[in-house]
Image: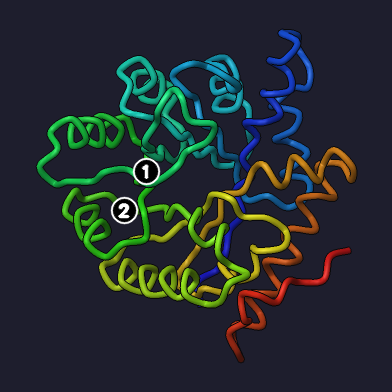
């Protein structure tokens, strides 16, 4: 079974800082605390409107973080240029609309999209591993494969909304992950995952990486970042272990400590 990594998204640490325009809380300190709690890597999304993470945050993380950095970005020339200069371990291309509160769906992917091909090529030439944030649909996965990227990240928003209703949304993720794996793509997942619903996605054997942010930051307000990450890792590990013998029903939440 594919090992499962946890990347913690620290965007909303910067959201709190930007609310007052001061220098705390520090995203770099949050990243280090997440790693102390067991995170395998750190994710940040530098949005075009700079609503939370700032250019200086990405630079500080890329230059000082002793763990892989997953840099989420849209096809914006200035942000692409920053990524190519900083050369994070991974660059994940995502869709972005100024009016959205959070990313509402996957990237529109076409092998004939010259702008997307150019962005991928620029990042690859800079030495970045490129991933595409996409919906878990077979035709979209095929298009991502045609673009030559090594990895895709599934938008799990539909699962996050429907996981209590039955297995349909999780089954879609299972089928999509198997299809992507059969094509030789590394499979990541994220969006709307929490301590209550992570067990279903963590149990999908072809998924090798989860990107989770808001729920971790929310729990960290009460328990601290290290403890919040440590508990999430425990839930992921338990779900992965259980999946070796039986698939957990998505409506059965884990026991939280």
Residue that mark 1 sits on: 129
Picture layout, residue 42 above or below residue 255: above
Q: Quadrant of the C terminus?
A: bottom right
Q: Nearer the viewer, residue 20 or 46?
A: 20
Q: Position of residue 103 (x, y in %)?
A: 47, 38
Task: Residue 90: give its label.
Answer: none
Which percent across, then down, holds residue 136? 37, 60
Residue sitting at x 87%, y 41%: 224
Residue position marked by numbered label 2 in the rendering: 150
Above or below residue 50? Residue 245 is below
- Residue projecting furthest to the front: 165
Of residue 205 and residue 175, the one placed in the foreground of this image is 175
- Identify which residue, 151 or 221, lies in the foreground: 221
**SS at mark 1 in the image:** strand
**Disc 1 vs disc 2: Cβ atoms closer than 8 Å?**
yes
Q: Earlier in the sequence, mark 1 or mark 2?
A: 1
């Amino acid at each position: 079974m594919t090992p499962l990594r946890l990347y913690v998204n620290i965007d909303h640490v910067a959201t709190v800082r930007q609310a007052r325009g001061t220098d705390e809380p520090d995203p770099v300190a949050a990243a280090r605390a997440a790693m102390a709690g067991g995170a395998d890597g750190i994710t940040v999304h530098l949005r075009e409107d700079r609503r939370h993470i700032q250019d200086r945050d990405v630079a500080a993380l890329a230059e000082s973080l002793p763990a892989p950095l997953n840099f989420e970005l849209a096809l914006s020339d200035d942000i692409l240029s920053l990524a190519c200069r900083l050369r994070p371990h991974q660059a994940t291309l995502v869709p972005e609309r100024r009016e959205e509160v959070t990313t509402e769906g996957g990237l529109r992917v076409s092998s004939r999209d010259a702008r997307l091909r150019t962005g991928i090529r620029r990042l690859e030439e800079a030495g970045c591993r490129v991933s595409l944030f996409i919906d878990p649909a077979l035709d979209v996965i095929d298009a991502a494969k045609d673009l030559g990227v090594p990895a895709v990240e599934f938008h799990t928003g539909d699962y996050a909304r429907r996981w209590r209703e039955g297995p349909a949304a999780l089954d879609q993720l299972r089928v999509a992950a198997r299809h992507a794996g059969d094509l030789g793509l590394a499979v990541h997942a994220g969006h709307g995952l929490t301590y209550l619903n992570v067990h279903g996605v963590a149990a999908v054997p072809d998924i090798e990486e989860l990107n989770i942010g808001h729920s971790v930051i929310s729990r960290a307000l009460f328990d601290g970042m290290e403890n919040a990450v440590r508990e999430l890792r425990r839930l992921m590990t338990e779900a992965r272990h259980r999946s070796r013998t039986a698939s957990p029903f998505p409506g059965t939440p884990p026991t939280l400590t």
